[in-house]
Image (cartoon, helix red, strand yellow):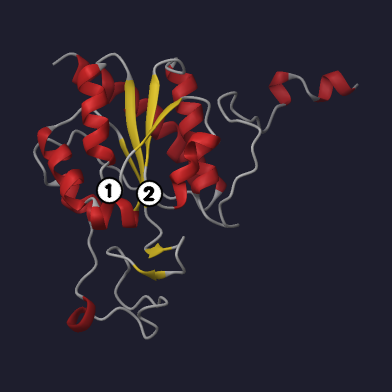
Amino acid sequence: MANDIISPENLVYKKPTLMNDTTMHYCPGCSHGVVHKLVAEVIEEMGMSDKAIGVCPVGCAVFAYRYLDIDWQEAPHGRAPAVATGIKRLWEDRLVFTYQGDGDLACIGTAETIHALNRGENIPIIFINNAIYGMTGGQMAPTTLMGQKTATCPYGREPELHGYNLNITELASHLKGTCYVTRQSVDTVASINKQSVQSAKRLKQVCKEREAR
């Protein structure tokens, strides 16, 4: 009876084989754990487990190498796209990607991000945007929404005082070197499933198109 219940066709949830048995340090309710699982699933589905290289940021995901059993490279704060560019140009057959938060990508790494996109580098950039500096106490970030309250703007973000929030997705979509941009959420099971399917299919297509150039 037990074997019938756990048979493959009845399987509802399965941990990707690339995920290590390590307790995550992330705060409860953040999306990093979910996105790590999606990334692992896509890499496995593409058959790139032995050729995937992730570039870690400085921020909440600085310890991403603890959780996914692939090759990783640490990058200085905000410089992940530059580091990934160098790795990809040396090892063209590798799946090289960055995994960055809003402080790392949209603040100190704005220049590296924009120029890597504009050059059309063949590197997926995974941008985790929760619109605050979560690791250091919830301060306002470049992506903090108008009116959103944080530790450093307790009355809400005001354009006259703090400037407008950066819309990184829209900015990236206007750069001629950018191949594909999508914004997804992982707050519900439906959105997670949608993100998983779209990411896998589109990443495969993008990689093939870029490698053919």
Q: Which residue is mark 1?
A: 78
- Residue 84: x and y in percent read 27, 31
Which of 181 and 40 lies nearest the eye of the viewer? 40
Q: Position of residue 114 (x, y in %)?
A: 15, 46
The CA span between labels 2 and 1 is 7 Å
Image quadrant containing the N terminus: top right
Which quadrant of the rendered structure holds the C terminus? top left
- CB within 8 Å, label 2 to label 1: yes
Name which residue lies at 46% across and 52% down.
60
Q: What is the number of the mark on residue 58? A: 2
Compared with 198, 18 (above or below) is: above
Which quadrant holds residue 166?
bottom left
Name the amino acid, label 2.
Val
Residue 66: % across, % down: 54, 36
**Secondary structure type for disc 1:** loop
**Residue ID at (48%, 39%):** 64
> In the visual, does 55 lie left or right of 79?
right
Instruction: Kindly identify the residue that appears in the image at 23 percent across and 58 percent down.
Output: 167
Residue lying farthest to the right in this orientation: 1
List the single residue furthest toward the bottom: 155
Residue 165, above or below 207:
below
Q: Amino acid at mark 1?
A: Gly
Q: Is residue 14 left or right of residue 145?
A: right
In the image, what residue occupies the spot 33% across and 78% down?
A: 147
* Element marked by disc 2: loop
- Picture mark count: 2
Q: Nearer the viewer, residue 203 or 17?
A: 17
Q: In the rendered image, which quarter is residue 57 located in? A: top left
